[in-house]
Image (spheres, helix red, strand yellow):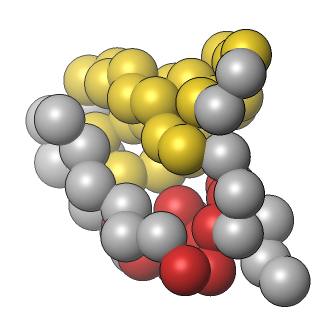
């Protein structure tokens, strides 16, 4: 089983860099990313669970 941060980094490739986990509660966990092309920070929350089975998309 792969942890969620590792699965996110693998799916997002070089487009986004995972900076850190911001926190979470219940079933979701929030992360801070850097969009590498524009050098801006993006926050997104993902469902907790088996990270290997989840698709990573930023909203």
The answer, for residue 6, to whether it is visible in the render is no
For the C terminus, give its image quadrant: top left
Q: Is residue 42 left or right of residue 49?
A: left
Q: Is residue 34 left or right of residue 54?
A: left
Measuring 39% from the left and 29% from the top, which residue is drawn there? 44
Residue 28 in percent (x, y) is at 59, 30
Q: Which of the 4 image quarters holds residue 58?
A: top left
Residue 23 in percent (x, y) is at 73, 16
Q: Is residue 18 above or below residue 38?
A: below
Of residue 27 and residue 3, the one placed in the foreground of this image is 27
Measuring 37% from the left and 70% from the top, which residue is drawn there? 55
Measuring 84% from the left and 83% from the top, which residue is drawn there? 1
Residue 32 in percent (x, y) is at 52, 26
Of residue 1 and residue 17, the one placed in the foreground of this image is 1
Q: Is residue 10 left or right of residue 15?
A: right
Of residue 28 and residue 14, the one placed in the foreground of this image is 28
Measuring 48% from the left and 50% from the top, which residue is drawn there? 17
The answer, for residue 58, to whether it is visible in the render is yes
């Amino acid at each position: 089983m792969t942890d969620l941060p590792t699965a996110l980094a693998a799916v997002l490739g070089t487009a986004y860099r995972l900076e850190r986990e911001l926190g979470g509660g219940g079933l979701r966990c929030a992360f801070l990313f850097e969009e590498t092309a524009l050098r801006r920070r993006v926050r997104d929350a993902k469902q907790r669970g088996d990270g290997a089975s989840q698709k990573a998309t930023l909203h």
